[in-house]
């Protein structure tokens, strides 16, 4: 029961973050560029 509620809470947080990035293309672009930068530097 407790584990299930933890999973649901985590999923809720992830869903909220997904919604935030979906409505904020600039933030999504920023994250994408940051990932590319990490790949290029490695």
Image: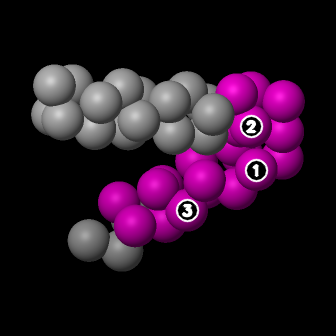
Q: Which mark is residue 34?
A: 3
Quarter residue 23 falls in: top right
Residue furthest to the bottom? 41
Tell me the distance, in whole angstroms, between the alpha carbons under discs 3 and 2: 17 Å
Give percent across and percent down for residue 22: 74, 27
Tell me the distance, in whole angstroms, between the alpha carbons under discs 1 and 3: 11 Å
Q: Secondary structure at mark 2?
A: helix
Q: Residue at x 70, y 56 (%)?
A: 30
Question: Mark 3 or 2 closer to N-term?
Answer: 2
Q: Residues within 10 Å of mark 3 (few under 14, many from 20)?
A: few
Q: Residue at x 18, y 35 (%)?
A: 2
Q: Which mark is residue 27?
A: 1
Q: Nearer the viewer, residue 20 or 3?
A: 3
Residue 26 in the magenta stretch? The answer is yes
Let me know if residue 25 appears in the view: no
Tell us which disc is closer to us: 3 or 2: 2
First to last magenta residue range: 19-39
Q: Which mark is residue 20?
A: 2
């Amino acid at each position: 029961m407790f584990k299930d509620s933890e999973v649901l809470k985590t999923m809720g947080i992830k869903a909220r973050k997904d919604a935030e990035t979906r409505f904020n293309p600039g933030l999504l672009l920023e994250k994408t560029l940051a990932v590319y930068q990490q790949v290029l530097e490695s």
